[in-house]
Image (cartoon, rainbow, N blue to C red):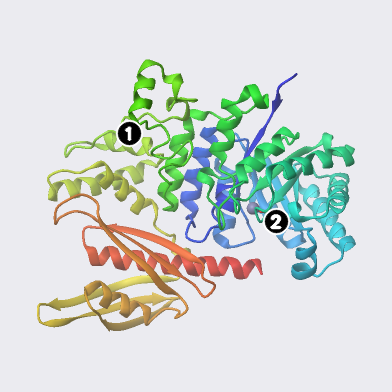
Amino acid sequence: MEKRNSIIFDTTLRDGEQSPGASLTVNEKLVVAHQLARLGVDVIEAGFPIASEGDFEAVKLVAQNVKGPTICGLARANDADIDRCWEAVKYSDKPRIHTFIATSKVHREKKLQKSKEEIIELAVKAVKRAKSYCDDVEFSPEDAARTSLDYLCDVVKAAINAGATTINIPDTVGYSEPKEFGDRIRYLFEKVPEAKDVVISVHCHNDLGNAVANSLAAVEAGATQVEGCINGIGERAGNASLEEIVMNLVTRQDYFNVNVNVNTREIYRTSRLVSNLTGIDIQRNKAIVGDNAFAHEAGIHQHGILQSKQTYEIMTPEEVGWTGENLVIGKHSGKHAVLALLEEEGFQLDKETITQVTERVKELADKEKSVERDDVIAIARDITHQLSDEEQFVKLMEFSVVTGSNMTPTASVKLRVDGEMKIAAGIGDGPVDAVSNAIWQMVDPSLKLQDYHLKAITGGTDALADVSIKLSDENYNLFVARAVDEDVIRASVKAIIKGINKALNYREKIQTQG
Ligand code: KIV
Ligand code: ZN
């Protein structure tokens, strides 16, 4: 039988970034998008342009600069969203508008309070408006996996007739079981003959841990586009992990008989980049990209591997780009060594940033005996994680702390909050506690510090301090932020303020979405 092509659609920058705490700056999004293009994904969903100024800028910047993949933006089924989306994606050689509206009974009745007919009308109107701007239009009936089958077919038929070129079937809440989801796709092909003339896509969430299995079941049933995120990041339990889908399709070509355009050797680097920039660590035993994915510790396995790799390895580490080179940075290493190490870690930095990182590495090297790999990664992370001026609702102006053997640590902090200068003093059990208490007096009381973690990156009292914090908002969304500095208190203050800004940016984005 002739091999089909499977379109790989990456939504790390849209659905992946929607997970609280994962928010990336505009420049970080561009860096990830360039790496996704090197990976060879067919479509990059770069963001939700109407959601915030930052999202709009990011989609526009990606559309202007990233060549190769189709650049897509998300829009709800209304004129304002679609117009804004087009304003951002129109700079791409291959723009796509992705519009959606919920179709399941619970969403129709509880969220939208619209009848079945009204939803179809809105879907058709949205697809037609998107089509008036560009040929490539994707339509998603949100919560399709919980939508009654025959109504789903009616919606899909109407969207195709209105001009949609891709129909995406999302399992929005990760509710499906693999066979059931595959059957849903088969039913669609059976009842909507027009479906074979467009791309049928799937988009699965991982709430029951089935996202990859459901996506693959859909490919078996005839779906020709699969959506997912690098490292499986995303809201709640995440989206389908794109690298797992790709490696299933590649490793088991004998089973799926499907072609993908992805350069699998870029997988490891992409995965590390996304983890480094989002601050979301990769589980050690995660398939394909976890630290243990290719480690064989058991004696019996090692014996087998030594005889023939095929005994226990179904794919090679090289195939996913895992070189295991582990470059070491010495005190005298220059820009090239720093660049090589960071490239291995998935960073793609411009010249100016490489110079900044190298300068900080040298400063550290002058103070410390040796600079280790993790120091360099931490410095690069710190520099590339800076929020843009617009993203800094709260800005640190200055702080001081007084502490001693027989006194309660006291801090004074000056912040600019939404353009207004504020000063507060705080006391605490230690100096970090004192500055933290001073900061919290000046910011929204619904934000709460949930976790504080301090790590000395390498040994010694002169080691870099790597502080990660977690804070929550009034809706229990969690935000993670991280900062590195030679001074523990400075690193702590920077991390707390970064976390507060992430939460405030997220709130603004949600408020805009309504
Ligand atoms: O999960 C979902 O339903 C979505 C849609 C916008 C496609 O992300
Ligand atoms: Zn989704």
Q: Residue furthest left?
A: 405
* Image location (x, y in percent) of residue 182: 74, 40
Tell me where residue 44 sits by quadrant: top right
Q: Amino acid at mark 1?
A: Ala
* Image location (x, y in percent) of residue 307: 37, 16
- Secondary structure beneath dot 1 equals helix
- Mark 2, residue position: 75
- Mark 1, residue position: 340
> Is residue 11 toward the left or the right of residue 476 in the image?
right
Residue displayed at 39% across by 42% down: 349
Residue in front for this viewpoint, 75 or 322: 322
Q: Earlier in the sequence, mark 1 or mark 2?
A: 2
* Image location (x, y in percent) of residue 23: 49, 57
Dot 1 crowding, Cα within 10 Å, few <14, some 14–19, many 20+: some
| Quarter occupied by the C terminus | bottom right
* Residues marked 1 and 2 touching at CB (< 8 Å): no
Is residue 80 depicted above or below 359 in this figure? below
Is residue 308 depicted above or below 198 in this figure? above
Residue in front for this viewpoint, 65 or 249: 249
Residue displayed at 79% across by 58% down: 103
Dot 2 crowding, Cα within 10 Å, few <14, some 14–19, many 20+: many
Q: How many marks?
A: 2
- Can residue 44 be seen? no
> Is residue 74 toward the left or the right of residue 311 in the image?
right
> Is residue 68 toward the left or the right of residue 30 in the image?
right
Residue in front for this viewpoint, 344 or 285: 285
Is residue 414 depicted above or below 513 in this figure? below
* Image location (x, y in percent) of residue 279: 41, 53
